Image (cartoon, helix red, strand yellow):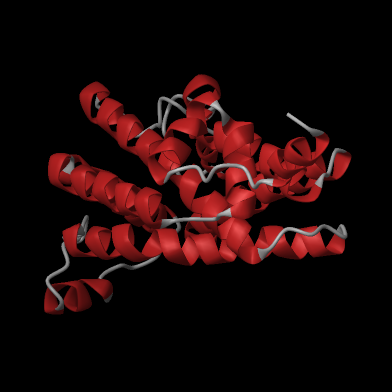
Amino acid sequence: MNETQETQIEDLPPPTMTQPTKLLSLFIAPIKLMEALKTNPTIFLPLMLIIAINLASILLLADFNQQVLDHTNTILMEHMLDQGLDITPLLPVMDEYGIEPTGVDLNFLLIINSIFAPLILGVIYAFLLWLMTKIARGDATFPMYFSLYIHTAVITTFGTFLSTLLMAQLSTFTDPASLAAFLMPTSNLSSPLFNFLSTITIFSLYSAILTFFALKTFNDFKTKALIIATLAYLIPNLTLTLITSLAFIIV
């Protein structure tokens, strides 16, 4: 083989990774996955898988999901009563809309959530990463980060499904895969610390590691990749903690 042929081979683009291979690479070859997403960001197959997992969760765990909502509403109302608030005016409204004082029928909401939430959250998360990348003078594009989120969401969605399944079997409302299960095993939704620790799970941490690899691959970052990945992990978790805790602070 002469030098011209060798140069032509070197100039050939790398073979395109198929979508099933990309999903498998989430676990066995994350760096190769990030290289593939950099040149060919895709979302169709992982998005369909996320929706399928969510729908399976609704079908298989409908009773427990309702128990979780009832438990949350019960704690919130008990907190309102402890604060000396009168919930009597709320009862006619609940009755008018067919809402139980300790729960609502949430299957329809979960179905809508399973379809649209990954897309909405993906746009927000991708924009956050893109914005921080631009501030750090990186070159990654919004589609790269959107594809990254949808792929990593496969892990967190499946992790949530497994955790909910375990919670139903163990009759607990604390995620067994979260840091809260080890440090604050007794569910306490009124505690901001408990709510924050509940967002830190084995699956979300692995997704954060994948985000770190992506930032390095997409932008050739090093220290910046660690900083941005950490911020991208903490900001959504702290926001979720704030929203959950505000329900108890407001009342």
**Viewer-proximal residue among 10 and 93:** 10
* The N terminus: image quadrant: top right
Q: Is residue 43 found left or right of 136 in the rendered image?
A: left
The location of residue 223, given as percent across then percent down, is 87, 39
- Can you name the residue that lies furthest to the front here? 2
- Residue placed at 68% from the left, 50% from the top? 232
Labels in figure, total: 0
**Viewer-proximal residue among 188 and 79:** 188
Q: Is residue 199 found left or right of 135 in the rendered image?
A: left
**Viewer-proximal residue among 196 and 149:** 149
Q: Is residue 99 found left or right of 130 in the rendered image?
A: left
- Residue placed at 31% from the left, 62% from the top? 115
Look at the picture and state if 242 lies above or below 217: below
Look at the picture and state if 110 lies above or below 52: below
**Viewer-proximal residue among 57 and 224:** 224
Q: Is residue 238 found left or right of 152 in the rendered image?
A: right
Q: Is there any visible trace of residue 190 in the rendered image?
A: no
Look at the picture and state if 182 lies above or below 196: above
The location of residue 145, given as percent across then percent down, is 61, 56
Question: Which picture quadrant has residue 210?
Answer: top right
Q: Is there any visible trace of residue 7 in the rendered image?
A: yes
Question: Which picture quadrant has residue 64?
Answer: top left
The location of residue 225, given as percent across then percent down, is 79, 43
